[in-house]
Image (cartoon, rainbow, N blue to C red):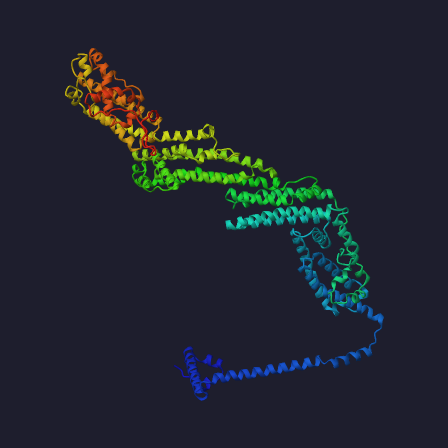
């Protein structure tokens, strides 16, 4: 490694870098840095730790010295400039050396007045704009333009080069010229304000004619356009509100603004164009062309003030400056559009504008009414609109007569269809909620129950029963008694929790809809605004749609029924179908809201002949048909189980002399009196009775008191058909003894007697196994024995026996005879008496037997 000598190290850096290697340079750099740090440490040791503060203090002293010198120089210059005595001496020397005559001073005064007028205009325009005096601002701008043009064109005002000598002229004109588009824009926007008077509207229109070269027609078109834009902005503001409550609260003010804008627009047109001849608009334009001003009511004798005087502030002696202005500036008057004001064209524009407003409101107005989600809110908003229209009715008719030449109803043309349409929309929306209840409310709960046991849902819960029984001990008021009766009625009607849920949802929803619709009833006799006709139309629409909605509700229940019948578990499917059918039955027979919803508007009370109303009876029939259809899966399941039991009874019983029932044959007293030898069957076999009893068990399981006559008839028909089909299959190539055939004949005739409502069995195949001569002798005794055995079994077969209740009355004598013959297993038949009149316990009367 080459070591650099001191001569090289002290030479120029470029020389060092050219002669040394990279490693040597790095070593040199490191040594240099070490030397610097060493010197710093030595300096700190000599000066101490305060050397930084000393350096900062020294810098501050230097900066203060420089600033003090600058301030001293400025004070010296200010003193020389503000030396008034020296300035006056210099001015006197100049005046003495250059004497000026009055003739030479005149152009100077004129130039000074013109420059002064330009200097004051921006402030005056700004002041006028702040106070919405746009015509005043337009006049000021026009005068300033005249002054500026004069300064540029008139040679008398140019003893010197004004642009070079007075740069303020250019700057002031640039500032004034900046206001021109603002004046036109603000005057145009001010046309949207409906609270101003017709005179102020005319002034805004004159601004457009003065600065924007508009004619009478185009300026009025601009008025209509701005009022239309104002109405659109009001609509947009109403639709933009995101909170429903806020939109509902502000809707009234928005509708009021729209109505007021329409009424005030035509009122302004009437004021400026139709009130006088010539019109006020033409008079204002004429005054502008003659005096460049409008009459000032505050001045004596209504004398117009010179326009140029308004340029200067009130504290200025304006007359001292005005007299030096050129005559062309003092006497300047503008020239406005010279087209005549055609009233026919204005009337046509007003007609077209009203049609445009109608088109503007047609689409968004229903959306504006969207936050009104009930008929009560809609009626309140409509009442406010009617009150506002009635308050201006007299003046509005006069304005329409002059401007349009005919009457014009804002309600009929602009608002009626939207309000009526929204009322119908609310009806449709509410009834859609009603018709969708089976899908939204009932279907999920049925799907939930599918995983559980439906048998507990076919009877009222034990909690409901205990509540009804326990309340008997604490009834002390009319309210408690009413609640007890209601609970007892629900128990008697078989309302389970699921049925009660669907029933209450239907009743509550329909009753709420009906009561909400009754808000229109208070206007049923009002003739103004065609309220009576509209109310009747809405009520008719409501009733017709109620019928459609309930029909759709029934269709949704039927669709739910079809969905349930596709379940794999037949028992659960049949039980769920029964729940759907019983809900339909409850709505058909016990609904209170349904007949009220179909009443007439005139009374709003339940009609005495509501049961004869074809609409109401039609809906009842639809529900009852659904009730009967809902029992079809259950009837099929019962018939299937019955078929299995009958088939087992026929196949598992020995129909011969060894049949167990043959050992129980006996002779009766009638047989002994007729001296007939040999016993005959007196009771059916146990499997046969058990098959019938299974049907009774199933009927009792599902609460048989809720079955109507048609359902029972369908069940009996199905059981009899199954019995006949099973018997025919069993008797094919079947061999049996005569005694076995007689016992089988007794069993079959007994079952046929129980199921007699379904028709008669065909027993010809059984009779083939019995000697015809013997059957001719035995057959007269079978009917009596079957009836006796039937009466013995009524305690067990009560459910099916009730369907043949007439047998009780025809066999009272027989029953009493059996009791006298010491047959204790037969209950004596006595005439029924009314018991438990406070409880809904059915008595075996003729009415209950008739189903």
Location of residue 836 by image quarter: top left
Point out the image quarter for the C terminus. Answer: top left
> Could you tell me residue 175's position as x and y percent?
69, 63
Q: Give the residue at x 52% y 43%.
A: 376
Q: Position of residue 155 (x, y in %)?
A: 81, 64
Specify whether 585 is left or right of 282.
left
Q: Is residue 737 visible in this depiction of the protein?
A: no
Could you tell me residue 668's position as x and y percent?
Answer: 18, 17
Quadrant in the rendering for residue 764:
top left
Q: Nearer the viewer, residue 676 or 45?
A: 676
Between 601 and 294, the residue placed more toward the observer is 601
**Quick one: 670 or 254, which is closer to the camera?**
670
Above or below, 557 against 780 in this view is below
Pick the quarter of the image with the N terminus: bottom left
How many numbered discs sit on the rendered protein? 0
Q: Residue furthest top?
A: 773
Direction from residue 389 to residue 18 in the image, left or right: left
Q: Looking at the picture, how far across and down is residue 434, in whole percent?
A: 44, 38
- Tell which of 18 and 159 is nearer to you: 159
The reply, left or right, for residue 531 in relation to residue 761 is right
Q: As drawn, is 85 to the left or to the right of 552?
A: right
């Amino acid at each position: 490694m080459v070591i650099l000598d001191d001569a090289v190290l002290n030479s120029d850096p470029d020389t060092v870098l050219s002669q040394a290697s990279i490693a040597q340079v790095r070593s040199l750099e490191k040594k240099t840095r070490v030397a610097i740090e060493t010197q710093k440490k030595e300096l700190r040791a000599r000066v101490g730790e305060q050397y930084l503060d000393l350096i900062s203090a020294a810098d501050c002293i230097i900066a203060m010295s420089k600033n003090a010198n600058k301030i001293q120089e400025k004070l010296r210059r200010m003193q020389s400039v503000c030396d008034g005595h020296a300035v006056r001496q210099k001015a006197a020397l100049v005046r003495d050396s250059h004497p000026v005559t009055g003739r030479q001073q005149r152009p100077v005064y004129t130039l000074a007045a013109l420059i002064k007028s330009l200097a004051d205009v921006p402030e005056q325009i700004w002041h006028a704009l702040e106070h919405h005096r746009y015509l005043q601002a337009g006049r000021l701008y026009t005068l300033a333009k005249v002054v500026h043009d004069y300064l540029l064109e008139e040679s008398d005002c140019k003893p010197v080069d004004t642009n070079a000598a007075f740069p303020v002229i250019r700057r002031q004109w640039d500032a004034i010229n900046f206001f021109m588009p603002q004046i036109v824009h603000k005057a145009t926007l001010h046309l949207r304000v409906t609270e101003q008077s017709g005179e102020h509207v005319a002034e805004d229109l004159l601004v457009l004619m003065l600065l924007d070269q508009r004619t009478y027609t185009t300026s009025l078109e601009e008025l209509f356009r701005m009022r239309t834009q104002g109405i659109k902005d009001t609509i947009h503001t109403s639709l933009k509100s995101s909170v429903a409550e806020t939109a509902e609260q502000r809707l009234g003010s928005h509708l009021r603004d729209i109505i007021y804008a329409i009424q005030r627009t035509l009122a302004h047109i009437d004021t400026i164009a139709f009130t006088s001849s010539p019109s006020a608009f033409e008079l204002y334009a004429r005054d502008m062309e003659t005096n460049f001003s409008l009459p000032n009511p505050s001045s004596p004798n209504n004398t117009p003030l010179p326009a140029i005087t308004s340029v200067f502030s009130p504290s200025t002696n304006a007359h001292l400056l005005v007299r030096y202005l050129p005559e062309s500036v003092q006497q300047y008057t503008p020239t406005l559009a010279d087209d005549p004001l055609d009233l026919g064209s204005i009337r046509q524009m007003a007609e077209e504008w009203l049609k445009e407003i109608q088109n503007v409101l047609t689409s968004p107005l229903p959306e504006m009414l969207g936050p009104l989600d009930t008929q009560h809110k809609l009626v309140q908003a409509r009442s406010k609109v009617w009150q506002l229209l009635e308050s201006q009715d007299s003046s509005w008719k006069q304005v329409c007569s002059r401007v349009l030449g005919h009457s014009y109803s804002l309600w009929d043309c602009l608002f009626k269809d939207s309000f009526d349409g929204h009322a119908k929309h609310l009806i449709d929306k509410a009834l859609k909620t009603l018709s969708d209840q089976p899908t939204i409310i009932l279907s999920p709960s049925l799907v939930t129950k599918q995983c559980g046991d439906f048998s507990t849902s076919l009877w009222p819960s034990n909690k409901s029963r205990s509540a009804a029984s326990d309340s008997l001990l604490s009834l002390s008021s009319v309210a408690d008694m009413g609640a007890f009766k209601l609970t007892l009625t629900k128990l008697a009607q078989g309302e389970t929790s699921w049925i009660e849920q669907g029933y209450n949802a239907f009743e509550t929803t329909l009753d709420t809809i009906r009561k909400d619709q009754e808000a229109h009833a208070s206007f049923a006799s009002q003739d103004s605004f065609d309220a009576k006709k509209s109310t009747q139309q809405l009520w008719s629409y409501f009733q017709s749609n109620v019928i459609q909605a309930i029909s759709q509700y029934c269709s949704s229940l039927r669709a739910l029924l079809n969905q349930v019948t596709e379940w794999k578990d037949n028992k659960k499917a049949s039980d769920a179908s029964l729940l759907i059918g019983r809900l339909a039955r409850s709505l058909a027979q016990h609904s209170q809201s349904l007949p009220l919803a179909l009443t007439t508007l005139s009374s709003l009370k339940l009609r005495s002949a509501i049961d004869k109303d074809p609409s109401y009876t039609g809906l009842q029939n639809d529900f009852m048909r659904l009730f009967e259809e809902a029992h079809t899966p259950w009837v099929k399941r019962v018939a299937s189980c019955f078929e299995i039991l009958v088939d087992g009874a026929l196949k598992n019983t020995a129909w011969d002399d060894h049949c167990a029932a043959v050992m129980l044959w006996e002779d009766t007293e009638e047989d002994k009196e007729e001296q007939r030898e040999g016993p005959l069957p007196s009771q059916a076999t146990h499997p046969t009775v058990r098959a019938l009893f299974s049907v009774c068990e199933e009927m009792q399981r599902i609460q048989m008191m809720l079955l109507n006559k048609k359902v029972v008839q369908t069940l009996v028909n199905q059981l009899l058909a199954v019995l006949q089909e099973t018997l025919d299959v069993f008797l094919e190539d079947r061999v049996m003894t005569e005694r076995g055939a007689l016992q089988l004949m007794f069993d079959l005739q007994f079952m046929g007697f129980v199921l007699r409502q379904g028709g008669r069995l065909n027993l010809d195949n059984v009779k083939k196994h019995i000697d015809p001569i013997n059957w001719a002798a035995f057959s007269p005794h079978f009917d009596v024995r079957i009836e006796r055995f039937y009466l013995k079994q009524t305690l067990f077969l009560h459910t099916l026996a009730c369907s043949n209740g007439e047998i009780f009355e025809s066999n009272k004598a027989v029953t009493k005879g059996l009791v006298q013959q010491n047959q204790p297993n037969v209950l004596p038949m006595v005439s029924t008496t009314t018991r438990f009149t406070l409880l809904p316990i059915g008595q075996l009367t003729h009415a209950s037997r008739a189903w």
